[in-house]
Amino acid sequence: MTSASAAPARPGWIGRNAARVEDDVLLRGGARFLDDIVLPDALEATFVRSPIAHGLIRSMNLDAARALPGVHAVLAFTDLRAVLTQDDIPLALPAGGLRFDVNPTCLVIHEACYVGEPVAMVIASSRRIAEDAAALVELDLEPLPAVVDPVEGLEPGAPKARLSCPDNLVAKTKVDYGDVEGAFAGAAQVVARAFRLNKGGGHPMEPRGVVARYDEIADQLTVWNSTQMPHRAKAMLVETLGLAEHQVRVTTPDVGGGFGTKAVFHPEELAVPAAAMLLKRPIKWVEDRFESFTASIGEREQVWTVEAAFDADGRIRGIRGTLRYDHGAATPYGIALPFNAATNLIGPYALPAYRMDIDLCMTNKTPAAPTRGAGRPQGTFVMERLMDAMAQRIGLPRDEIRRRNMIQPGQMPFTIPVKQRDGSMMVYDSGDYPECQRRALEIAGWDDFPARQKQAREQGRYIGLGLTNYVEATGRGPFESVSISIGPSGRIVVSSGATAQGQGVKTMLAQVVADVLGVAPESIHVVVGDTSATPAGLGAYASRQAVTAGNAAYRAATLVAEKAKTAAAELLEASVDDLVVNDGRVEVNGVPGHGKSLTQIARALAGTPGFALPGNLPPGLSASNDFMTSGLSYTNGCHLAEVEVDPDTGGVKILRYVVVHDCGRMINPMMVEGQILGGVVHGVGMTLFEWMRYDADGQPLTVTFADYLLPTSDVVPRIEIHHLESPTPLNPLGVKGAAESGTIGAPATIVSAIEDALRPLDVRITQVPVTPPQLRALIRQAQVAESAP
Amino acid sequence: MFDPRPLNVTVNGATVQRTVDSRVHLADFLRKELGLTGTHIGCEHGVCGACTVLVNGASVRACLMLAVQAEGCAVQTIESVAAPGGALHPIQSALARHHGLQCGYCTPGVVMTLLELQRESAGRAVSEHEVRAALSGNLCRCTGYQGMVDAALEVLNAPAAQS
Amino acid sequence: MKAPAFRYHAPTDVAQAVSLLASLENARVLAGGQSLMPMMNLRVAGPDHLIDLGRIPELAGVAQVPEGLLVGAMTTQRALETSAVVARLCPLLSEAVSNVGHQQTRNRGTIGGSLCHLDPGAELPVAAAALDAVMIARGPQGERRIAFADFPADYLTSTLEPGEILTHVLLPVASARAGSAFLEFNRRPADYAIVSVAAHVTLDEAGRVAGASIAVGGVSHAPVRLADAEAGLVGALADAAACAQAGRLAATLACDGDDLYPADYKQDLCETLVRRALGAAFKRAGAGHV
Ligand code: FES
Ligand code: FES
């Protein structure tokens, strides 16, 4: 499947399909996920949640719940307030751009703003008793009108999603460069389209969860949190609970998937530790699936109206339009998601002029925050659908119009005059976009397809081939940290602020360190996601950890190797330049056996009372590095999908899926492919299955896995993955991120294929997910139009 | 209300006698009473398959079965598939080789499903279609299923498996 | 979420079960648990008493009797799916049951549980409707036989009397020159059907339709038999035109729709699935014209 074979490109571990160090314990069922943590004396919590999308608490009677045997406490906000320094959770990203910030509280104080928002907390000897008690809480809410649709919510006279906000327009922003008016004024052609992309979520198979224990004697709070960002969780707890850094430890157990859902700090992540401090008892809360559908963040709902101006030969002159975005009931991520969407639209194409007006609407739905792809699948979707529309308008093949507009490898680095979150311009660092598309077309049999398609149509079968190119900004900074230490035991311990939710982060870090130190990855012990092991860190978001932590590990390991060599030079009375690190030993080049093991060197550097350290080096065979990024590295790819549409049912079957992917140099191709596979399938879900639906009152309609459809093994195609490797100049390893790019390309690709399959009917898809009834309705309309005189 | 019921069940070959609250489902019983936390809970409404165990050899959703319904049954969980510290079962090692797991949360359920398929398909070749149908009751958000499918095809269609 | 509390009862014969069910307040029968358990775990069902039929041996198993195929209500869907007797004598049931859920749910789920739960998207009620299954129930007043057509009462509700338990299902044995097919449309193969169709036909020696029954599920609270189409088929040549004609009639069925699956979409599915299912049934019955 991979063009990068298992054989190493050079001796060493980087670039090899090393076996994952994570797998053995997971396969045996011996891993420890959050719900597997059992503390003596622990209680279990559940939450009473708002049953309506918008309302004011008139009264809440907790007596019956409190009286149930086995119930330890039933807490409202006022109870928890006793241990809090402030009412709200200060989530707001500093680079706001918002007209107003809306931070959540750990429990509703007065106004409930979405179904599922936690209102009260029940703590009992077991979860089932806590739930029995929760059912006895008498919550009386005065219903208020709910804002459900982000377009309607921005209309004059719309009800307010939050009474305290002036209106629902959270932010008005734009991406704007070049002479857009001029581009349209002089254009030979203009196509206009409107799209709606609906809400979906991350849905890790392990829901969220928190265990908190407050140790009164040590005055220490320990929190096990199934999170992607323990350091940020710690910062929130320090601030809201009024503790000092040394008093709080947040650590992640094994985490069963994240996909963005576990990145943002949710109200329960404060409520549980606060309750543990208040009650001085360990408390566990494990989100159940029903809760995760209502209380965990999601995103993706965007409504676009766009126009593209282009020349007669298909060269694009400019794009303009509006993007309205559903922000949900709080603003944990500022304007990041629609901004990602609008900027990722540009993709691998030279777009001379661009203006997108972005309106963010507050609604009475669960707050929106990044979910695998983080707005980018939508932007790519819009651009690629425009490309197809342009091609169709002037009768150019879909591949050719893209080729004519692509940024050429010789233009790298390519600057786009759009300012990023960190104030820098958007710069594509490396990549060969035309070659990426060329290879994908060749593999998928693009040139032969029209003949196959014609043949199929003669048999009454509607097959189509879809094409998409995209880029993804990966490796977001500002930094990630790694420390490596080898103690007298000789054991190599790597600790990092990176966090693991299944990506294989431990294997990735072990491989990098193993490569430098010449040892086997499985001999390295990696600690991630623990604030007590690594004081500073950021964690998992924006496909960043191979870039940031990977390079930090590389640099730290290089420092360790250098120190080992310096010490060994002293011990061996040799010149540093003659020494090499190999197989866990520092040896004199060309004199096998003449050297010192890293263990021996570590022992020497541990110090002996009264004796000098070798070479008067600082003690300890250890080193740390905080890798600071100097810009985003852009991964790119080309996807092709072949689908068959059943025109009678509107059913879509994906017959084949091809990915050519370029994330620079790969540390472990097998794991990169794992990320792409999972990402593409998430994108398949977004395109054909997953839709978090609400009724007109803001009641969620899809709160089980029977109603919210995840792709299953019998509906996803085999995905063929091939690689280009254009190393980025931005980091020593030359690596870029890979975790989200599969999702970014999939929706546009599949929809392109569906439209291609139905070309004789000229069906135009404006919404994802594409459901069979919607598709059938479009087909029927087209059939009626065709049969009309 | 507590409705205590005696329960006699064989779990991973060992006889277990307990008194359980009748409303406790088998997954919670295994996890909380017996400490067998390899059986995971992903939905508790019978769709995700994370809780899959074998009861008298047949795969079941342990969240959709009361512990008391297992009276007299033989239950097999992931913890029994490879001896502690011993070699992995061929299905387990193939999953690792084919990258059929990432976060590993769905993995125990997947292994139990594949064990049943292996037993039922002994002596014949299985198709990719059949493997995908069998695995369709196990949701996985990480892998896109491909590595699991390849692992199953490799092990179930190995020459020795068919003889 | 965890199920609310209840008292658990595990009778070992039908008489005990019937008397428990008749005497206890707010009691429910637990068959395979594949529908009731999720409802309890979501706290949308909260019986005070749960009567588990899983310990009653006489309720499980398949037997050929003079009247047809007698299937115990607690026979698991997986047992039906793998039964050679069922495949031979009642292939429509075999085909329908293989479409039910996943193997993990078929291993526990029972025929009786599915027929009594009557989910509009469920497969087995549609097969039972097409086959004119006879439901055999036992209650405080003794045994009663109910034609499947009279079995559904309302959404998720049967006409079983309080205290009655479904014990067996009697199915006709397929004759020579009979053919059947079960087809459904859903988003993912193991999901409940949006619309499902069970068709059963018998041909005469000339290749004309001697009898046809067509049931459609997913369009109403209970499966619907296409009486007009069935009547129109009798005597017709078993060919594509007959399938198309039946499909056109199916498209006029009154369907319950919602925002996601509107009624007119379901009518389209009725047309397509009836046409296709009938075609497959004709072919299996040996018709040469489809
Ligand atoms: S937890 Fe049992 S099927 Fe999901
Ligand atoms: S490996 Fe994470 S859910 Fe399957």
Image (cartoon, rainbow, N blue to C red):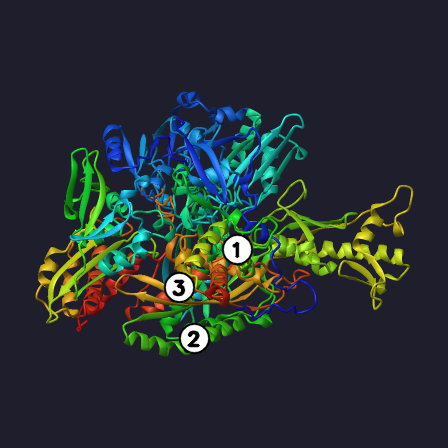
| Residue A267 visible in the snapshot | no
Q: Are marks 2 and 3 in contact (CB under 8 Å)?
A: no
Residue corresponding to mark 1: B101
Mark 2 to mark 1 CA distance (whole Å): 32 Å
Q: Residue at x 25, y 48 (%)?
A: C258
Asked if residue C129 lies left or right of residue A69, the reply is left
Q: Is mark 1 on a helix, strand or loop?
A: loop
Between circles 2 and 3, the one closer to the viewer is: 3
Q: Looking at the image, which is closer to me, A570 or A737?
A: A570
State the image coordinates of residue B69 (x, y, percent, origin top left): 38, 39
Residue corresponding to mark 3: B129
Asked if residue A237 lies left or right of residue A623, the reply is left
- The chain carrying label 3 is B
Q: In this view, does C136 lie above or below A585?
A: above
Mark before the other along the chain sequence, 1 or 3 = 1
State the image coordinates of residue A440 (x, y, percent, origin top left): 49, 71
Q: Is mark 3 on a helix, strand or loop?
A: helix
Mark 1 to mark 3 CA distance (whole Å): 20 Å
Mark 2 to mark 3 CA distance (whole Å): 26 Å
Between circles 2 and 1, the one closer to the viewer is: 1
State the image coordinates of residue C27 (x, y, percent, origin top left): 28, 32
